[in-house]
């Protein structure tokens, strides 16, 4: 990911935008950029929410939402805001490096904490609410940190587009009274990307990312070995030039009731964006990808013809209506 250099932001103004917002970074002169009037109003609402908090810890991941939140919190609150990223085997190394680089490039402090969800058998068994145990562990780490260092609130990057999606981590956020300023301001994912672009944040065009454990089907155990295979496979595909990429990791021959256990066989189900499907099938791309993934340890490499789509792991879940609504 290319990072913008420190200093004045270079902002492209589109003629269709009518609103103006003012950036008042503490160590820079005030400057303005143009956005649509609705987004401008929501941006000011976000700044007001953060100012009302007085101080906050930002649950930071380096993704589109949390980068915007950490940046604006730093702009509004200065040293009364701190971004904290959780490091564990489910976080790709490239993502950690980029998240830390973004903090340096855009002058908001980032601290790394080590979380221990991999010591929790409830997490490792990979139930459909696995994300609950991950977020619970994260907020268990952040709560005493916030109290010890005098931060008034913990905030995270839930946004208005997340409402109605199956996201059990929101239950943990509710239990710890974690705030969601982006959602409170009414900012959707598309608006967050638009606003990020206007603010000069390189994450404006970053593909959506989820933790590596999300690549393992529910009910199949999460292990560090599997996540390492997934990480290497996705890095390889991105290095080949693919943008929206998921490698879903499946196990074959893992029947626990079998009288004689057979060696576990790993299958990779590749998802790429619909617009990239033809590229994957052109020339030697698919053959090269298959050969490379087999060297990682996958016996079978397949392409999902439905392409990448958000939350495909949830497609097999049949939810009652009450559970389909995200808890807040």
Image (cartoon, helix red, strand yellow):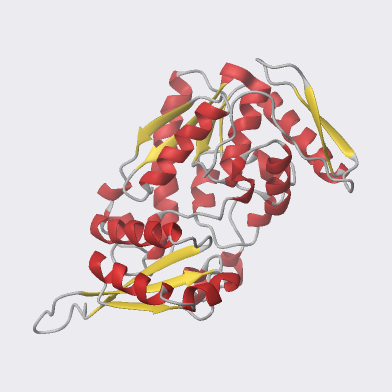
Q: In the displayed orientation, state which residue is furthest to the bottom.
A: 259
- Residue 1 location in percent, x, y? 52, 45
Residue 262 position (above or below residue 43): below
Task: Report the residue at 38% width, 43% height from top.
Answer: 137
Q: Is 239 left, or right, of 106 in this rendering?
A: left
* Res 69 quadrant in image: top right
In the image, 11: left or right of 231?
right
* Residue 157 seen in this snapshot: no
How many labels sit on residues? 0
Q: Position of residue 224 (x, y in %)?
A: 26, 55
Relative to 302, say whether 157 is above or below: above
Locate residue 300, reporting x and y percent. 29, 78
Furthest-left residue in this view:
260
Picture quarter containing residue 222? Answer: bottom left
Taking 9 as reference, is 209 above or below it? below
What residue sits 87% from the left and 44% below the top?
17
Question: Residue at the location (70% across, 36% down)?
Answer: 199
**Closest to the observer: 10 or 113?**
10
x, y (%) of residue 305?
50, 81
| Camera-side residue of 156 and 204 | 204
| Quadrant hosting residue 301 | bottom left
Task: Say which of 293 and 160 sits in front.
Answer: 293
């Amino acid at each position: 990911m290319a990072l913008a250099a420190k200093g004045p932001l270079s902002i492209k103004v589109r003629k269709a935008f009518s609103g103006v917002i003012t950036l008042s970074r503490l160590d820079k002169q005030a400057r303005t950029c143009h956005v649509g009037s609705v987004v401008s109003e929501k941006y000011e609402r976000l700044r007001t929410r953060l100012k009302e908090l007085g101080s906050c810890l930002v649950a930071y991941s380096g993704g589109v939402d949390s980068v915007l939140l950490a940046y604006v919190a730093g702009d509004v609150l200065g040293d009364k805001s701190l971004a904290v990223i959780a490091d564990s085997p489910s976080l790709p190394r490239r993502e950690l490096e980029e998240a830390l680089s973004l903090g340096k490039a855009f002058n908001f402090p980032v601290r790394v904490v080590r979380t221990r969800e991999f010591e929790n058998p409830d997490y490792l068994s990979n139930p459909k609410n696995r994300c609950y145990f991950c977020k619970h562990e994260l907020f268990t780490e952040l709560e005493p940190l916030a109290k010890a260092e005098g931060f008034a609130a913990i905030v995270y990057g839930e946004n208005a587009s997340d409402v109605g999606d199956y996201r059990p981590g929101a239950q943990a956020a509710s239990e710890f009274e974690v705030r969601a300023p982006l959602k409170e301001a009414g900012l959707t994912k598309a608006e967050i990307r638009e606003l990020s672009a206007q603010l000069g944040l390189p994450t404006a065009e970053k593909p959506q990312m989820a933790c590596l454990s999300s690549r393992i089907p529910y009910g199949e155990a999460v292990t560090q070995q599997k996540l390492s295979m997934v990480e290497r496979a996705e890095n390889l595909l991105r290095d080949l030039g693919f943008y929206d990429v998921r490698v879903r990791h499946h196990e074959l021959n893992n029947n626990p009731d079998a009288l004689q256990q057979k060696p576990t066989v790993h299958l990779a189900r590749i998802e790429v964006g619909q617009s990239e499907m033809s590229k994957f099938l052109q020339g030697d791309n698919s053959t090269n990808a298959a050969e490379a993934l087999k060297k990682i340890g996958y016996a079978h490499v397949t392409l999902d013809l439905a392409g990448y789509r958000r939350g495909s792991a949830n497609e097999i879940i049949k939810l009652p209506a009450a559970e389909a609504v995200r808890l807040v």
